[in-house]
Structure formats: C-alpha cells, structure tokens
Image (cartoon, grey):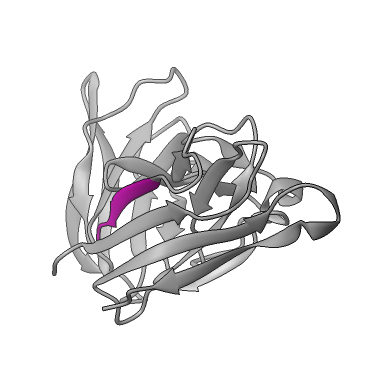
Amino acid sequence: MDNIKLNFINKSNDINNSNIVIFQQNVAQEFGKIAVAWKVFKNCGVMDNHPFEYSLDFGITAADSYGNFCPMIPADAGNTYEFVEKEFDFFLQVSARKAANPSEIEVTNLRRTGAIDVSCYRNMKLLAIKTKVRPGEKAYFEFEPRIFIGLASEIEAGDILNSDIISTINTEINLLGITSADIVLTGGGAGPNSAPFNFVLENVK
C-alpha cells in the first residue's frame, strides 16, 4: 500500500517557535507511560509547512549489551522474528511461525545468554523500543493508525518521552482511511487575546 502523505502547516501565533513532536503508542503490551519521539519539526515558522509521509511498512533491529546493532530487516504485522547467534555473529531472521495476534510484530531473543534491545522503525525513524529482552523472552509491537502531536521543547527525534511529556503532547489524529491531509496548527499568541493551540485536519483525501 502507498504511504500516507501528510503536511504540517503552522498557522498559529506561536511566539516561542516551539518544536512539533509526533509519536505513536505501542499498544501490543503494557510498556508504561513511555513512547519515542518519531518526528520532531524545528524552526517551522508561522505560515511555514513541513511535508512528511507515514509509511505502512516497518523495520526492526536489535542491539546487544555492548551497543552493537544487527542490520535492520523489513517487518510485517502478523509475522514473527528471531534474534539468533552463530559463532561470533548475531542477526535477526524471519520465522515460519505466524504471530498469535495478526496485528502484532513479534520478536524472540533466541540467544543463549545476554539481553537485547529491540527497536521498531517507521520511515527509517525510531518508532518504539523494548529494552532488556532476555533469552527466551519476546518483544511485541502493534500500532493503531493514529498519531499523537503536540508542542514541546528540547526534544530530539528518537528521544524517550516520559509520562509528563506525553501528557502535554495529547492531540490524537486518526489516520484510518486517509491517503493525504494537512495538519494545521492554530492558536497561540500573547496577552489576553491568546488562544489555546489546536491541531486540525484539512484537505483530507
């Protein structure tokens, strides 16, 4: 399927030139209130726009305790993957077994020793991570077709977002059935005439 084409447009009166942060929640299992900053738009001034795409494809990779990453491989919901080692090499491979939940990506650590961190990517950008997956354990990833967007400062793409930050990036946008749309930011300003920031979809197709 084709990627969803999105375009952020700043029509606000933001006097602080805030960063725009986008993330998704991994709904496959309970991770606690954390997420990863998938997209961060900086210095997008008033009436500027920032086009981007929402890919329907995923990539996964894994890292050992030394910070060594194996090559990223494509991943699809409903499939299972294995992190295996051979002599001094380790890598991810697709398994013939299907996931119990067809909406989930499932990754098993088959190493004899050593925990791994499993990362899931969208558009080659980090989307979610499950840390300290021990031998025999699994990481699960599932994402509904929705993004969360908001204003924040001092956040970089790939940063882990804690519950305090997530509570401020709380506008949910449902992308189900959409092929393209503008995400328009309004509000802001100074003094008594300032208005709350608001994200809305326009030109939806």
Q: Which residues are magenta?
A: 49-55
Figure disc tally? 0
Residue lying at the far right of the rendered structure: 192
Provide the major secondary structure of the magenta segment.
strand
Q: What x and y, as percent, mark residue 6?
A: 31, 60
In depth, the one of 28 and 181 nearer the eye is 181
x and y percentages locating residue 47 in the rendered image: 44, 48
**Which image quadrant is residue 88 in?**
top left
Q: Residue at x 40, y 54 (%)?
A: 8
Residue 33, given in percent of the width and then of the height, sits at: 68, 55
Is 44 left, or right, of 98 in this rendering?
Answer: right
Q: Is residue 8 magenta?
A: no
Can you say whether 201 is above or below 137 in the image?
below
Horizontal side of residue 113 vs 124, given as left or right: right
* Near-viewer residue (35 or 63): 35
Name the residue rendered at 27%, 41% in the picture: 124
Q: Quadrant of residue 181?
A: bottom left
Give the quarter of the figure containing the C terminus.
bottom left
Residue at 34% from the left image edge and 41% from the top image edge: 125
Residue at x 55%, y 69% (from the top left corner)? 172
Is residue 54 depicted above or below 152 in this figure? below
Query: Visible in this render: residue 167?
Result: yes
49 or 82: which is nearer to us?
A: 49
Image quadrant containing the N terminus: bottom left
User: Left of 30 or right of it: where is 94?
Assistant: left
